[in-house]
Amino acid sequence: MRRDVFQAIADPTRREIINLLAHKSLTLNGVADNFNISRPAISKHVKILTECGLITIEVKGREHVCEAQLDKLSEVSDWVEQYKKFWNDKLDALENYLKVLQSENKPKNKKHGKGKRTR
């Protein structure tokens, strides 16, 4: 099964694993120690993150050390950015439209033509 970054970040546990590894490399056991779920469940999450290229695992002796590869998150950032621009453009257009409406509905100073009041 081909996985992508969006599948990886869809799960809160995987997002937390990425967050942990963004700050420091951890062994698989070190990752698992941060969660109240089974080690096989953690292994499944780690496998998905590895398949998506968000983490790498380096074997050092008997330990498997996980490291974050955050550059893959640029796919998510690029995708979000296009919608951010879209909505900013729409909101700017709405703001301009509301300014036009507001200026059209301002009460105008009308002269009554009755002459000036004198005391």
Image (tube, rainbow, N blue to C red):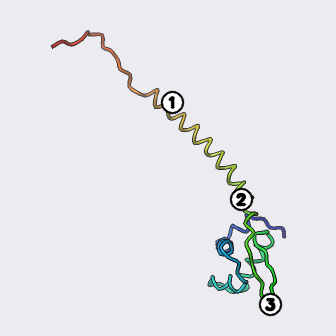
C-alpha gap between disc 2 and disc 3: 34 Å
Q: Which residue is rendered at x = 73% and y = 72% of the image? A: 68
- What x and y, as percent, mark residue 112? 30, 13
Give amino acid for label 1: Val
Give amino acid for label 3: Arg
- What x and y, as percent, mark residue 9? 69, 67
Where disc 3 sits, the SS reads loop
Judged by depth in the image, the label closer to the viewer, 1 or 3, is 3
On screen, residue 89 versus residue 7, left or right, reads left
According to the picture, the residue beneath numbered tag 3 turns out to be: 62
Where disc 1 sits, the SS reads helix
Where disc 2 sits, the SS reads helix
Disc 1 and disc 3 in contact, CB within 8 angstroms? no
C-alpha gap between disc 2 and disc 1: 36 Å
Number of numbered tags placed on the structure image: 3
Give amino acid for label 2: Val
Disc 2 and disc 1 in contact, CB within 8 angstroms? no
- The extreme bottom residue here reads 62
Which of the labelled discs sits on residue 76, or is there none?
2
Mark nearer the N terminus (2 vs 1):
2
- When asked about the image quadrant of residue 117, the answer is top left
- For the C terminus, the quadrant is top left
According to the picture, the residue beneath numbered tag 1 turns out to be: 100
